[in-house]
Image (cartoon, rainbow, N blue to C red):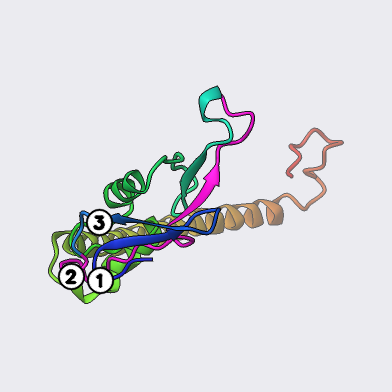
């Protein structure tokens, strides 16, 4: 949970609450909210953890990505989230897709370099899709013409070879499949 003073309050397993000063000023970052349960959770290292000293100790687990390693303090959690899961421009905290959607739709990113690059990339992809579609269409037309020509030649061959001189396999003619 984040409040305006910049302190994160969390509930530990024993029910007491802990507080740690935030190094980020939430007033400067309008989208910044860091909250337990949503962004991190209190957990324990498993009893079979590879480092014996850590077995059974409490840790904080980032909830924004399954690839993040457990962290030992709220300060580490905050630093991790700021470096890995926060938009630098406005302070929005979220997983990669949420941050991407935020950049796409939020007013705080209008005119930003990241949004410009995104818009340029979307325009490029649209142009490329049109080029690819045109190439597929032309390839389809070329193939259709080839198939029609083959069918026409096959029909001409069938009309000539349907006499007594036969094009049957028994008389040594080529068999068509």
Task: Identify whether 168 is placed above or below 108.
Answer: above
Callout 3 environment at 10 Å: few (<14), some (14 to 19), or many (20+)?
Answer: some
Q: Earlier in the sequence, mark 3 or mark 1?
A: 1
Q: Which residue is mark 2?
A: 27
Q: Is residue 31 left or right of residue 34?
A: left
Q: In what element is the residue under mark 3?
A: loop
Q: Quadrant of the C terminus?
A: top right
Q: In what element is the residue under mark 1?
A: loop
Q: Main secondary structure of the magenta part?
A: loop
Q: Residue at x 64, y 28 (%)?
A: 48
- Magenta range is 26-50
Q: Is residue 168 left or right of residue 136?
A: right
The CA distance from mark 3 to mark 1 is 10 Å
Q: Which residue is mark 1?
A: 4
* Residue 40 percent across, percent down from the top left: 45, 54
In terms of depth relative to the viewer, which is nearer, 77 or 89? 77
Task: Identify whether 172 is placed above or below 131.
Answer: above
The CA distance from mark 1 to mark 2 is 7 Å
| Residue 73 in sight here | yes
* Residue 116 percent across, percent down from the top left: 16, 63
Q: Which residue is mark 3?
A: 22
Q: Nearer the viewer, mark 1 or mark 2?
A: 1
* Residue 110 percent across, percent down from the top left: 16, 72
Callout 2 environment at 10 Å: few (<14), some (14 to 19), or many (20+)?
Answer: few
Task: Identify whether 33 is placed above or below 143.
Answer: below
Does the CB distance between marks 1 and 2 fall below 8 Å? yes
């Amino acid at each position: 949970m984040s409040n305006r003073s910049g302190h994160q309050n969390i509930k530990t397993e024993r029910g007491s609450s802990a507080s740690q000063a935030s190094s980020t000023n939430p007033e400067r970052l309008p989208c910044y909210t860091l909250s337990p349960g949503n962004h991190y959770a209190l957990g324990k290292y498993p009893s079979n953890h590879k480092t014996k000293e850590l077995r059974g100790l409490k840790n904080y687990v980032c909830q924004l990505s399954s690839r993040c390693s457990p962290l030992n303090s709220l300060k580490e959690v905050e630093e991790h989230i700021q470096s890995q899961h926060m938009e630098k421009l406005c302070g929005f905290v979220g997983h990669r897709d949420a941050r991407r959607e935020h950049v796409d739709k939020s007013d705080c990113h209008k005119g930003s370099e990241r949004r410009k690059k995104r818009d340029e990339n979307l325009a490029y992809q649209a142009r490329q899709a049109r080029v690819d579609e045109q190439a597929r269409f032309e390839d389809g037309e070329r193939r259709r013409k080839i198939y029609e020509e083959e069918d026409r030649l096959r029909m001409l061959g069938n009309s000539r070879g349907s006499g007594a001189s036969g094009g049957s396999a028994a008389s040594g003619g080529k068999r068509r499949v």
